[in-house]
Image: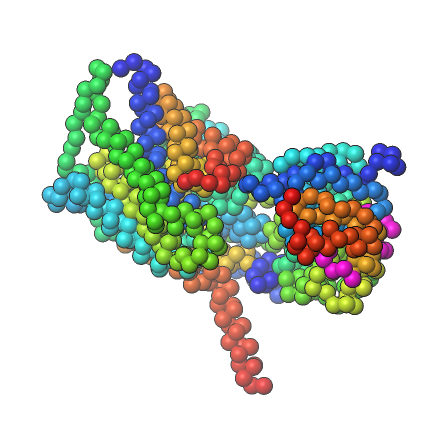
Amino acid sequence: MAREFAADAAIPPSWLWWLFVAALAVILVAMPQFTDVSLQLDLSIIFVLALLALSMSFLWGYVGILSFGQTIFFGLGGYSYAILALNAGSTLWPFAAAICLPMIFAAVLGYFVIYGRISDIYLSVITLVVTLIFEKSIRSTSGPEYVIGNVRLNGQNGIPGIPGLQLPWTSSALSIDGVFYLAGGTALIVYVGLRLLLLTSFGRIIVGIRENETRMELLGYDSRVYKLAAFVLAAGVAALSGALYAVWGNFVAPEMFNLNQAAQVVIWVIVGGRSTLIGPVVATGLVQYFSNWLGTVSIGQVTLVLGLVLLLFVLVFPRGLLPTIAWAIESAFSGIRGRRS
Amino acid sequence: MDLVATTAYLVIYSISLLVLISLGLAVIFGMMKVINLAHGEFMMLGAYVCVLADNAGIPLWVAMAGSAVLVGAFGLLVERLVIRRLYGRIIDTLLATWGLSLFLVGGVTTVFGPQGRSLSTSFGNVSFAGENLSTYNLLLIAVTAAVAVLTWALARFTKFGLIVRGAMQDPEMASALGVNRSLVYMATFGYGAALAGFAGAMLAPITGAAPTMGVFFVAKAFITVIVGGHLPLMGTLAASGLFGAIDGVVSYRWSSVLGEVSVLVVAVVLLRILPSGITGRFRNGL
Amino acid sequence: MNAATPILETRSLEKRFGGVAAVDGVNFALNKGELRCLIGPNGAGKSTFFKMLTGQIRPTRGRILLEGQDIVGVEPYAIGRRGVGIKNQVPVVMNGLTVRENLWLAARARRKGAAIAAAIDAIVERLDLGPILGRFVGELAHGQRQWVEIAMVIVCEPTIVLLDEPAAGMSDEETSRTAALVLELNKSATIVVVEHDMQFIRQIARTVTVFHQGRILVEDSFANVVANPVVRDVYVGRQGVK
């Protein structure tokens, strides 16, 4: 029971983990030499979505808040970058703003929900409703009167032709290689950063609040401040993911806010398990490949299978795929040892 | 009709619509504390049954009754296979019903295609105080009122209703008195599903039947049920009254999107003041 | 606040759940440095009373004065920071974390840097928690979990300590240790203890307050309370509803 959350505070990651991270970094740098463009594109989007998964697994696994609305900030990040970059002509500060603006909205939404002491399930449903309202609102902006600056929102057709990110010392936007490194590098840095956050006071306090909010309050911690800060941080990561999505595909659409996207985020974390950060990242890759493969068949079937996966995991593998596999392996080994003695 | 009367009519219609789509969810939530995210899809299934039956020539009222029965039966199945395994695990139930909802949307899309279908029967208008009012809208208001009264009567006057009320107020005591809790839960979930299916069928003449129609209604139903609090009838009526009025007025004056946003804002603010909903503090009543 | 003002006081404190009054008009006064025992049959309202003092439950009516200031409606974390510590009937601790981490969180609440480690070392030594430092609290026995909770409370250097059944589930030896600890704590903090275990109370008691059906029945020295026939009837059950 007590081991359900391996995301235990204050245990510095072992040298094995650092080796693992270094290996990932090396693979990331070397990969474009050995892979073709289409694989790079596919992997880039997986890195982008992995960031979204990380924001969810941080918020749910570390902080204990089940938000169905990380897509709110994902979509806001994408749309903010699109609107600002197309209006301004430059891309660097719009990218930064695309992370900050959704965080401001997160602070407001989070304030209402966290300081309002709205209980868990209600919070989950409210965040789901908010993302659906964003989807619906943007979907209804097809007319030419829906313009911000000189960028039309375009309703359900989305905003095309978004400029790629251009670093100040270069003369053109990032190439496919560049986007690959940016997405992969960012995902790796955020993953390491979040893991190391556990070692800081803030990280340990957040985990304490997740474990027993009442006791933390009795000790004198204002849990609301910490939860709000974590909520805004998670929103920032999701917004970063959204901005990168816009950079990757040069396109944003209301689908970024929709139910399917929101469901996928939840599924990644359920399949990957809440007890690690890396689990959901792996799950994102698996689910994405699986969905792409299914997507060649028809939309209906992707949704159907997603639903079945969610049902299956909740009923049969509540701890997630990776933790269950790990537990099964552990049990098998201890069983063998037991029999020998 | 003057402005006040028009607005009043729109508000009553909005309220009725909310009551219709929320009652099934409220019954399940009030009894089992389960948030059934597949509620919208139960409605969608009801709409499909109704449309398909009607297109096949079956009289509309039979089709609607059939929707209630079939979706109700489906609800019993869902309760047995899924919900029952997750008693007490609120978040897991939420996720499982979400999975079910996606499964149903995907399934219906695969079988019937993503396009919506409409009813072959159509309704006319009546003239009232100098304006044409859709007959069907009036019918909906009347039928919703009837369904609410029926639910109240079932709870108030039947033996089963008494058992359900007892189990709702004090599950431990009810168990101790020999009430078969699983049976009560199963029947309640089935009834809630039947109400949802019926609501979908009632909406079919207005919205037709499309695989993703449930998503639109789910959000509204949720907010209504959560703000209503744990008493299914009183809570739903109170919250529907409030939100129906707000939505009706704002949608009429500005736009329907703004209407929904206003409702959400009011809901979040209200939940801050009354975290357990409007009827959260009430002990007795339905 | 002068020497005569009670450090903790409640006036007409009431808590109703639906139609039932768990606490029904309690006027309670605690002086600085006191060691008070609260006894009474189950359901008499003692735990509810405690939870109102920490801000976890909001009273229906009445006032709670902490060092002269009304704290009704104040958030629990603010009351905690003002020096009120509680050890609950069922330990409210971070079961999924280690003992060491629980203590760190308690120490960090009011300290920074090197002072945290120093505080942890001090409490580990004082309560002999060394052997269980690395264990997950959820895996410990009830008695050990209580000690962890008490340790966390002490680390926060409270001015008022509320102990809800500190001797529950403890062996005789552990009970004596706990009694000794309570007496020692009393040198630096005002203490209120809720208990059923009369042996334990005998070891520490000064003034005893008897709760019954949400009200204070009797408040007197231990010897007098034990000899009081009304109190005995309440425990045995012959005293009827008021």
Task: Indicate the quadrant containing the N terminus of chain B: top left, top right, bottom left or bottom right.
Answer: top left
Q: Quadrant of residue A79?
A: top left
Looking at the rendering, the stretch of residues picked out in magenta corresponds to C182-199
Q: Position of residue B113 (x, y in %)?
A: 23, 47
Residue ID at (54%, 33%): B273
Q: Nearer the viewer, residue C146 or A146?
A: C146
Q: Position of residue A207 (x, y in %)?
A: 63, 52
Taking the magenta stretch, the answer to whether it contains residue B200 is no
Relative to B238, residue B9 above or below: above
Q: Nearer the viewer, residue B77 or A150?
A: B77
Taking the magenta stretch, the answer to whether it contains residue C188 is yes
Residue ID at (46%, 47%): B169
Q: Quadrant of residue A217?
A: top right
User: Would residue C228 appear left or right of C240 to someone viewing this image?
Assistant: right
Question: Can the viewer see residue A11 in this picture?
Answer: no
Residue ID at (53%, 50%): A60
User: Would residue A192 appear left or right of C168 to someone viewing this image?
Assistant: left
User: Would residue B139 appear left or right of B281 to someone viewing this image?
Assistant: left
Q: Position of residue B8 (x, y in %)?
A: 33, 21
Q: Position of residue A115 (x, y in %)?
A: 59, 37
Q: Quadrant of residue B186?
A: bottom left
Task: Indicate the quadrant containing the C terminus of chain B: top left, top right, bottom left or bottom right.
Answer: top left
Question: Can the viewer see residue C9 in this picture?
Answer: yes
Residue ID at (68%, 38%): C25
Q: Nearer the viewer, residue A309 or C95?
A: C95
Q: Nearer the viewer, residue C1 or B152?
A: B152
Residue lying farthest to the left in this orientation? B57
Residue lying farthest to the top in this orientation? B2
